[in-house]
Image (spheres, helix red, strand yellow):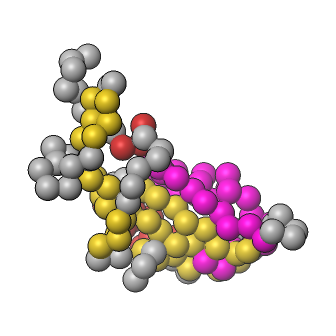
Amino acid sequence: MTKNQLYPIGEISQWPIGMQDGYLRRIAWFTPHKLRQSASNSHIKWLIMKILVRNLDRDTIEHDVRKLFLGYGRVVECTLVLDKETGKSKGFAFVDMPNEDEAKVAIKELNLTMFKGSKIRVKFAGH
C-alpha cells in the first residue's frame, strides 16, 4: 500500500455531493490516512447513479430492494423511504450504483416489471 494509493468510493459513506444533469457527482481524492476534496484539480471523478424505484409494495423492506439491484452490479447505498407512523414502506426507494453502465441496464430491465406483487417503475432520480 503506497501513500498515494486511491480507494473506491464505496469505502467512503459521508461525502459532500452536488447535483448536475440529474446525476449525483462526488469529486475527491484521498489517501489511506487523509481525505481531501478538490473540485478544480481532482485526481479522480466518481459518478454515482442515483435511481428512483416507485410503486413498491408497502411490505417491501430495504434488503429486498438492495438484493434486486445487486443482481445488476454494485450497490453503494439503498434507501427505502418509510412512513413515520407505521414504519412500513411509503412505496418508493433510492438506489445508488457507482457504475453507469450497470445502472442503465438495471433501469432498462427492471422498469415496469413485477416485484413482490407490484409493477415497479424505475428511472434515474432527478429526471
Residue 75: where, in percent of width, then height?
A: 48, 51
Examine the rendering and report whether any part of residue 100 can be seen. Answer: no
Relative depth, front residue between 92 and 84: 84
Q: Residue furthest left?
A: 41
Rendered position, 119 above or below 116: below
Q: Can residue 5 be found in the magenta stretch?
A: no
Seen from the viewer's position, the closer of residues 44 and 55 is 44
Q: Is residue 77 magenta?
A: yes
Q: Residue at x 73, y 59 (%)?
A: 61
Determine the image quadrant of residue 93.
bottom right
**What number of labels is visible?**
0
Res 48 quadrant in image: bottom left
Where is 5 relative to 110, above or below? Answer: above
Please state the extent of the stretch shown in magenta in the rendering: 54-83
Residue located at (78% from left, 71% from top)? 83
Quadrant of the snapshot with the N terminus:
top left
Q: Residue at x 42, y 74 (%)?
A: 124
Q: Is residue 110 left or right of residue 61?
A: left
x and y, in percent, of residue 25 in the image: 31, 61
Screen quadrant of the C terminus: bottom left
**Rendered view: 111 above or below 98:** below
Decide if residue 28 is on the left or right side of residue 69. left
Q: Residue lying farthest right?
A: 86
Pinpoint residue 125: horizontal percent, then vertical percent.
45, 75
Residue 68 higher or lower than 109, as above or below = above
